[in-house]
Image (cartoon, grey):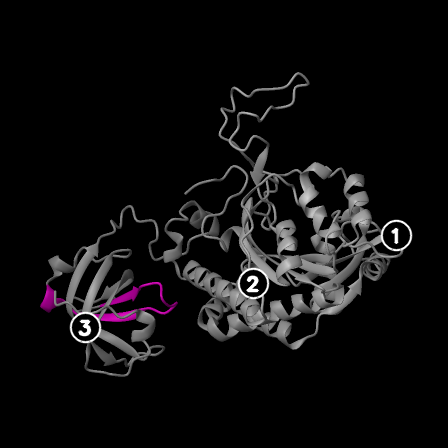
Amino acid sequence: MEKICRTRIVDVLKMDSFGTIVNVKGWVRTRRGSKQVNFIALNDGSTINNIQIVIDIEKFGEEYLKPITTGACISVNGELVESLGQGQKAELHACEIEILGTADPNTYPLQKKGHSMEFLREIAHLRPRTNTFGAVFRIRHNMAIAIHKFFHERGFFYFHTPIITASDCEGAGQMFQVTTMNLYDLKKDEDGSINYDNDFFGKQASLTVSGQLEGELAAMSMGSIYTFGPTFRAENSNTPRHLAEFWMIEPEVAFNEIEDNMQLAEDFIKFCVKWALDYCIEDIQFLNNMFDNELIARLQSVLENEFVRLPYTEGVKILEEAVAKGHKFEFPIFWGADLASEHERYLVEEHFKRPVILTDYPKEIKSFYMKQNEDGKTVRAMDVLFPKIGEIIGGSQREEDFDKLSRRAAEMGVPTKDIWWYLDTRRFGTAPHSGFGLGFERLLLFVTGMTNIRDVIPFPRTPRNCEF
């Protein structure tokens, strides 16, 4: 086969230099035709669109072409010809074909038929070859690019926080432990507690649930930083909205107060959504057509509407009024309740019909590091609530007062010995600062219209599932 530099299919489909010979490589989606002419739909992952390969059977011989079935990988040199068919500008008339890899049709699981999402999760190593997951993972890439671009253009520094940590940022205790010790031969003290003297770090260590605390340290020296990395929660939640391993974006900004934080969150989300519509429209259009015909309209509505700023107390009143008028919620609503997804979605989807930023939560349901309001009951927390998702961002103005922070940590059982370094930033040149966390996969759920968080990450980690 003559050596010609490969051209990606996404680029070939834009070409109009008809009559030239180009090379494409990819995986066969379908093959159809007659005894004289076959048509192969070829895809290399660069675009949702396939290129049609037209094959003269007599030129190659039926026997040579026999192994070219769905899933096979081929290299094709062909003449670029203007396509007469609808929906495509160009096609290739094959001059040379090299079969790079076959796929036995009796065992290759991705035949031309509908597959359930549950089945595709079982073959996560192959599902990126489907139109759906090719689209989702291209959008995932573009969202990562958008995130870095947004912060870089605004003077933020990308700061790498540790994956292995000895502190529990959220105080929830749902952490995966990291150890080199033989778990069947743990050394214990007289009181029955585990002795970590012989372990790698000489103390209990875990996978991080958040880079926030370390991010705050960086903000108090570099001004504006953001983290973007994997985080882990050993939470036994087998729901369509939870993962044990997921990615988080966490900006922290010195001198920002809660109002600045809310505006940053709104600007950030809108930037990402606009980027998706500008650079992923073919993939989004496919998902809109196949799964959620309101997806594009919902994305555009986020850009067109200002986010509502709503104090928690007012939000509870709205929900209580809804109950009084006959609306049924599964979970009870009262002041002091940690709102469930159904409550959040009611405010967004039915009452305001646009995104809502809920602020000033009761301190009892929020973390120790959030700045306390003067009423002594609430903190300067903020949650951004989105249609179909509920909470997509959680953040706050951080408590900069050393005494208040120390007292609140003690009240919530956070040992000073574990956060002495965090408290130091309040002892040496403290300043107001704020930040938030965005679960990357929650953003992807919104942008793609997918309904299960396992379907927006390549290899989901959930209770009882650690395949691939």
Residue 190, numbered label: none
The reply, left or right, for residue 98 in relation to residue 168 is: left
The residue that appears at 56% across and 69% down in the rendered structure is 150
Q: Amino acid at mark 1?
A: Gly
Residue under numbered circle 2: 157
49 is higher (above) or lower (below) than 409: below
| Separation of residues labelled 2 and 3 (CA atoms) | 47 Å
Amino acid of disc 3: Gly
What residue is pinned by disc 3?
A: 78
Residue nearest the observer in this picture, 288 or 207: 207
Q: Which mark is residue 376?
A: 1
Mark 3 Cα shell of 10 Å, populated few (<14), some (14-19), many (≥20): many
Q: Which comes before the other along the chain, label 3 or label 1?
A: 3
Q: Position of residue 260 (x, y in %)?
A: 72, 68
Front residue of this view, candidates 302 and 29 = 302
Residue 42 in magenta stretch: yes
Q: Residues within 10 Å of mark 2 (few under 14, many from 20)?
A: some
Task: Depth check: give the residue in front, 32 or 98.
Answer: 98
Return the x and y of residue 204 as percentages of the image width and height. Answer: 59, 32
The N terminus lies in which quarter of the figure?
bottom left
- The front one of 404 and 70 is 404
Q: Residue at x 67, y 39 (%)?
A: 418
Q: What amino acid type should be assigned to the residue bearing mark 2?
A: Phe
Magenta region: which residues? 39-60
Residue 351 sits above or below residue 458 on the image: below
Distance from disc 3 to disc 1, alpha carbons, whole Å, reads 73 Å
Which dot, 3 or 1, sits closer to the camera?
1
Among the two numbered marks 2 and 3 on one chain, the one whose residue lies closer to the N terminus: 3
Secondary structure at badge 2 equals strand
User: Could you tell me how far apart the alpha carbons at marks 2 and 1 are, in whole angstroms?
Assistant: 35 Å
Name the secondary structure under disc 3. strand
**21 in magenta:** no
